[in-house]
Amino acid sequence: MRLIRQLARRKLRTTLTVLGITIGVWALVLFGSMANKINGLVSGASATYEGKVAVTDASNSTIGLGISPMRISVADEVDAVEGVVAAVPEIQMIYDPTAGGSFGISDTVQGRVAATDVRSGEAALAADEGRLLTAADEGSMVAVFGRTLADKKGARVGEEIEIRGFAFQVVGILQSTETVPDYVAYVPLSAAQHAFAATLPAPIRSAIPEEELVSQVMAYPADGVSEAELADRIEAGVPDVSTVTRADYDKQLGTSVGLINSILIGVALISVIVGGLSVINTMAMSVAERTREIGIKRAIGGSRGRIIRELVIEAGVIGLTGGFLGVGLGVLVVQAMNAGGRATGNVLFAFTPVIAIFAVVFAAVLGMLAGLVPAWGAARLDPVQALRHE
């Protein structure tokens, strides 16, 4: 109660200091949640390459997305490479070439024969509404949408939706994964071939029949064969192809993502530290106003350690209060912005309890550290001089 009374003696100053910490923690929660979302998307995309090698046309320059046409016979050539236990042909294409995605994750259409890519993590996908694709869907114009893409495009189970100029019946919507599958429309391989062929220049359409079109092949290594070793074998044994492994994907994007995260967290930490400086100012002024009080405590036997402890705890309470308020405000803003962004597929934040705990603890510790300097100065005051202070 005595601590609360001390803070209440300077209502305006304490309120402004707490507000400074609150704004800093709010920024930390927002930027931390944004960095968490980016990391989740990138790690989810990276995980799709685990245990396999993506084989694309050598002219393809888009890391992680095979969009250049190849003949389906490439799958047979890849399958014949020593160490390959399965080669699955696929088609990937951007859902809408004129639109961007969330954090650079493009909305895509993926076509393959259902249940053939059993080691890709597809088994972990579950239908929230309707069903998943089956091998019996081959030859049909049906689609299963990721949750974010479904919300963005207004896809509903049982209704038709246009994809790349063709009508598809929506048979399922996936449960949210917070990663790449949320931005994908899954269709049978034949349907993807039909839509893909329509986008190609006439010379390519005449050179490669529609039923022979693919844009990438997923190769699975035999036991004891690493992805990197298999990638080297494929590039050496199959002409005019390039390969992407999980290590390649991580290497390409790791530096960029790390830089983005550093910038986001750096800006947030600067905001909190600026709030911490206001704690130093508040506590320094508090010490100046309470110099005589501190002198009395020292004169009647109060130790320097006790003076330091009281003032540091007071500063810590200011930081802790600002921390809780900042986290609360951050959660409200994150939820509001995510709710507004789901309609357009731009879910920007991934808030977790870890972020909240870190933000509150950081604010409390920062407040205590900020209060340590004026507290140390107060403890070193000469009791006689302090008693004479007016």
Image (cartoon, grey):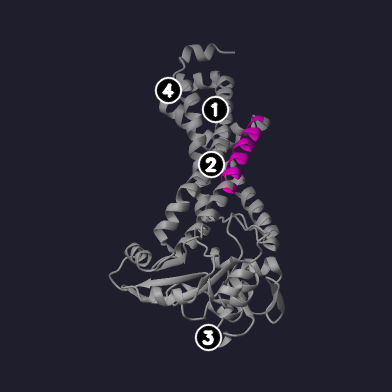
Picture residue at 45% right of the left edge, 73% below the top: 74
Asked if marks 3 and 4 touch (Cβ < 8 Å), the reply is: no
| Mark seen at residue 301 | 4
Which of the two discs, 4 and 1, sits closer to the camera? Answer: 1
| Mark seen at residue 263 | 2
Which of the two discs, 2 and 4, sits closer to the camera? Answer: 2
Front one among 46 and 371: 46
For numbered disc 1, what is the local secondary structure?
helix
Q: Main secondary structure of the magenta part?
A: helix
Q: CA distance from mark 3 to mark 1?
A: 67 Å
Q: Disc 1 marks which amino acid?
A: Ile
Picture residue at 45% right of the left edge, 57% below the top: 249
Q: Residues within 10 Å of mark 4 (few under 14, many from 20)?
A: few
Q: Residues within 10 Å of mark 2 (few under 14, many from 20)?
A: some
User: What residue is pinned by disc 3?
Assistant: 135
Asked if marks 2 and 1 touch (Cβ < 8 Å), the reply is: no
User: What residue is pinned by disc 1?
Assistant: 280
